[in-house]
C-alpha cells in the first residue's frame, strides 16, 4: 500500500527535527492541519503572546468542533491523534489564528502560525473551505489584481513577522498556497529576507500580469510548488515551470485532497509530468479564459453563483451531505434566471466544452476517464433530478388538462353556484 502523510507520521513521528530536518512532507501536514476549525481554541493576533499546545487543545471543551467539516472528519481526527502522540509534532505550539468570512467583501481567509522548540516556525494559510463565499473569491482571481484574501495574507505575514523571532517558512494547500506565494512576494524586503521556504500544494499561480506588480522574482528561488498528476486547481494561471508533479492514489479532482498524495520514504513521490488529459484540460481552460474579457468573466461568475446561491444551506458540507436536494435547488435557481442569463451561461460553458473537445481530438485518450470517474455519480444525480422535474411538469399539465375537460365537475360547479 502506498504511504500517505498519515503513514509518514507513523514511521517518522519518533524523529525530532534535529534528527530529520523539516521537509516538504512536514509542510504538507501542517498545511492540511490548518483546515481544522480552531475558532475559540487558538489565540488570535490580539493575544499575540499566548499560545496553545496540542495537549491544551485535547482538553478544550470545544475539541470536537475542530472536525466540523464532515467530509474530512475521519482522516482529520487521525491526523490530530498521530501528531499529538508523536515526538516530532507533539511539542507543537500554535497561535495568531485568524478566520475571516465575509459575504459583502467576498472573502474567506484563515491562517495560523505553528512553532516548534527547535526554533522552526511555519506560517500556514488555509485553502478554500466549505464556505461558498470562498469559492466566489477564488473565481474572482480571474478578474481582480488582488482578491481580499491576498490583501489579508500580506497583512498577516507582516503582523506575524513582528511577533515571531528568527526565520520562518510559509505555505498552504490550494488557495492557501497562492496566499503563501503572493504574501511572500508582496511583503517588504525586511520580511522577505527572513523567509526560508515557500510551499504551495496544488495552489493556483499568481496571474502573469500581476507578477510584475509584486516581487515574484525576488522569492522564486525559495518557492516549492507541488501538484498532483491530474492537477486542475494548481495549474490555474500557471505559466512557470517551477512545479513538481507528485504521485497520487486517487483519480481526477480527488487528487487535490492531500490525504491522497503519495509519500516515498521522507519525501513526496515524484512523477515525470502531468497526465495527458490534465494538459489538455488546462490548455483548454487557459485558452477559454483568454477568450473572455473581464466583463464577460465577471458576468459568468455572477451567473454561476446565482445558481449556487439557490441552495438553502449555502456551504459545501451541506451540498456534500444532501446532494440530490442541493441539485434540485440549484436547478430551480437556474430556472428562475431570466432568459438572457441562461443563454449567456449556456453559451460560455459551450465554448469551454468545444475548446476541450478540440484539443482532445487526435490525442491519446489514456487516462481521460480519470476526470469522469469522480463526477459520474453527480452526473447521474443531475440527470435523475432533471427527469423528475420533467415528469412533474408533465404530470401537472395532464392534471390541469383533465380538470378542464371534466364536464361533470363543470356541471356540478354550475349547479352549486345556481
Image (cartoon, grey):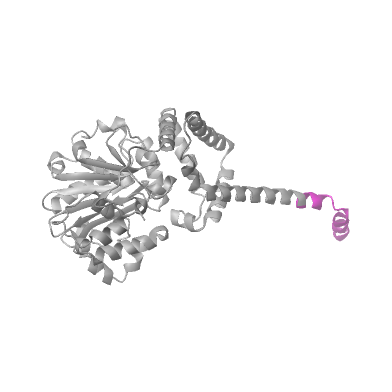
Would you say the magenta stretch is mainly helix, strand or loop?
Answer: helix
Q: Position of residue 356 (x, y in %)?
A: 48, 32
Residues rendered magenta in the picture: 399-418
In this rendering, does residue 14 appear at all? yes
Q: Quadrant of residue 411?
A: bottom right
Observer-nearest of 339 and 297? 297
> Split into 4 quadrants, where in the image is the N terminus?
bottom left
Q: Position of residue 310 (x, y in %)?
A: 52, 50
Q: Position of residue 221 (x, y in %)?
A: 19, 37
Magenta stretch holds residue 412? yes
Magenta stretch holds residue 122? no
In this rendering, does residue 92 appear at all? no
Observer-nearest of 135 and 303? 135
Could you tell whether 306 is left or right of 405 in the image?
A: left
> Split into 4 quadrants, where in the image is the C terminus?
bottom right
In this view, the residue farthest toward the left is 166
Could you tell whether 357 is left or right of 52 in the image?
A: right
The residue shown at (19%, 44%) is 197
Above or below 185: residue 94: below
Q: Quadrant of residue 40?
A: bottom left
Q: How many marks?
A: 0
The residue shown at (24%, 49%) is 24
Observer-nearest of 53 and 85? 85
The residue shown at (24%, 53%) is 26
Amino acid at each position: 500500500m502506498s504511504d500517505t502523510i498519515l503513514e509518514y507520521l507513523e514511521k517518522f513521528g519518533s524523529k525530532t527535527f534535529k534528527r530529520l530536518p523539516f521537509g516538504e512532507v512536514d509542510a504538507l501536514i501542517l498545511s492540511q492541519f490548518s483546515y481544522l476549525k480552531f475558532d475559540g481554541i487558538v489565540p488570535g493576533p490580539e493575544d499575540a503572546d499566548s499560545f496553545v499546545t496540542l495537549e491544551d487543545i485535547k482538553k478544550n471543551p470545544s475539541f470536537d468542533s475542530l472536525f466540523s467539516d464532515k467530509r474530512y472528519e475521519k482522516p482529520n481526527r487521525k491526523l490530530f491523534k498521530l501528531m499529538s502522540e508523536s515526538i516530532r509534532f507533539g511539542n507543537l505550539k500554535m497561535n495568531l489564528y485568524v478566520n475571516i468570512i465575509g459575504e459583502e467583501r467576498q472573502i474567506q481567509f484563515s491562517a495560523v502560525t505553528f512553532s516548534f522548540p527547535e526554533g522552526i516556525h511555519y506560517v500556514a494559510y488555509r485553502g478554500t473551505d466549505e464556505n461558498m463565499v470562498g469559492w466566489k473569491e477564488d473565481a474572482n482571481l480571474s478578474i481582480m489584481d488582488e482578491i481580499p484574501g491576498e490583501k489579508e495574507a500580506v497583512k498577516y505575514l507582516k503582523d506575524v513577522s513582528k511577533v515571531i523571532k528568527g526565520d520562518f517558512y510559509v505555505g498552504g494547500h490550494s488557495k492557501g498556497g497562492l496566499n503563501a506565494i503572493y504574501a511572500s512576494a508582496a511583503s517588504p524586503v525586511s520580511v522577505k529576507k527572513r523567509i526560508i521556504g515557500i510551499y504551495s500544494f496544488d495552489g493556483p499561480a499568481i496571474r502573469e500580469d500581476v507578477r510584475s506588480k509584486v516581487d515574484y522574482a525576488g522569492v522564486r528561488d525559495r518557492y516549492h510548488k507541488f501538484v498532483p498528476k491530474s492537477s486542475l486547481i494548481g495549474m490555474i494561471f500557471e505559466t512557470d515551470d517551477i512545479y513538481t508533479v507528485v504521485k497520487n492514489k486517487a483519480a481526477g479532482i480527488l487528487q487535490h485532497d492531500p490525504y491522497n498524495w503519495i509519500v516515498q520514504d521522507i519525501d513526496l513521490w515524484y512523477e515525470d509530468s502531468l497526465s495527458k488529459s490534465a494538459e489538455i484540460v488546462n490548455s483548454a481552460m487557459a485558452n477559454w479564459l483568454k477568450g473572455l474579457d473581464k466583463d464577460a468573466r465577471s458576468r459568468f461568475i455572477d451567473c454561476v453563483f446565482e445558481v449556487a446561491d439557490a441552495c438553502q444551506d449555502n456551504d459545501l458540507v451541506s451540498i456534500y451531505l444532501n446532494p440530490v436536494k442541493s441539485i434540485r435547488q440549484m436547478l430551480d435557481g437556474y430556472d428562475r434566471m431570466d432568459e438572457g442569463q441562461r443563454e449567456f451561461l449556456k453559451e460560455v460553458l459551450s465554448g469551454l466544452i468545444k475548446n476541450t473537445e478540440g484539443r482532445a481530438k487526435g490525442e491519446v485518450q489514456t487516462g481521460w476517464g480519470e476526470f469522469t470517474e469522480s463526477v459520474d455519480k453527480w452526473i447521474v444525480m443531475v440527470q435523475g433530478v432533471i427527469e423528475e422535474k420533467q415528469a412533474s411538469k408533465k404530470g401537472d399539465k395532464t392534471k390541469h388538462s383533465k380538470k378542464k375537460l371534466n364536464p361533470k365537475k363543470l356541471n356540478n360547479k354550475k349547479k352549486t353556484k345556481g
